Amino acid sequence: MFIEPSLGRKRQPEKRGQIEMICGSMFSGKTEELIRRLNRAKIARLKVEIFKPSIDKRYHEDEVVSHNESRIRSTPVDFAEDILLLSGDSDVIGIDEVQFFDNQIVSVVNKLAAQGKRVVMAGLDMDFKGKPFEPVPQLMAIAEYVTKVHAICMKCGDLASFSFRLSKAEEKVLLGEKESYEARCRKCFYEDLQ
């Protein structure tokens, strides 16, 4: 609390919203970093709510789980607008796999930040063809903080920022893990891209 010198009254500090985007390829530690930031907010006794798209049931139905098995309770939602309805009086909102939401997520995140909430998101910045994975580029543009994390190339051991799909499937969204994707550096990604 602050004391206004001229009035001698206590006033609450103003809540300022902000947007943080954690992006990168598969196996780069995006979810691990998201969980770390949300756990730190909990240690600070802030009210935290975490959301994920309901289609992502790879590890657990109602937990966000990293490839290293770090986990945190979450609420699966079908639509970005559901996050607005369910965020309540939370101070911090976490959103994992944000690339699976439609472009409405951009408006939702802006509204949450305007309400004074800290919004922390994690998502793929490129699809399996090496193209920008909407809506993540839009979210990066409106974020105050953008963190790009890197994996290790599964072919050469260099830093990797691409998600290489091992199958010939062409649909944009194909949920999978190590059986379906490998992290690749630029050189190894484009050598094997067909």
Image (cartoon, grey):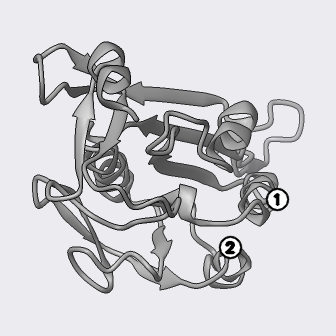
In space, the residues marked 1 and 2 are separated at their CA atoms by 9 Å
Q: Is residue 93 visible?
A: no
x, y percent for residue 184: 26, 28
Toward the front, the furthest residue is 194
Query: Which mark, residue 80?
Result: 2
Q: Is residue 11 left or right of residue 19?
A: right
Q: Is residue 91 left or right of residue 141?
A: left
Q: Could you say which is closer to the camera, residue 181 or residue 6?
A: 181
Question: Quick check: 89 above or below 126?
Answer: below
Question: Quick check: 13 above or below 183?
Answer: below
Q: Are marks 1 and 2 in contact (CB under 8 Å)?
A: yes
Helix, strand or loop at disc 2? Answer: helix
Question: Quick check: 135 above or below 157?
Answer: below
Residue at image coords 54%, 58%: 98
Say which amino acid is labelled 1. Ser
Say which amino acid is labelled 2. Ala
Helix, strand or loop at disc 1? Answer: helix
Residue at image coords 49%, 39%: 129
Q: Is residue 143 visible?
A: yes
In terms of sequence position, does the residue under pointer 1 or pointer 2 come before the other?
Answer: 2
Mark 1 lies on residue: 107
Sort mark 1 into few (<14), some (14-19) or many (20+) by Cα contacts within 10 Å.
few
Give the quadrant of the C terminus.
top left
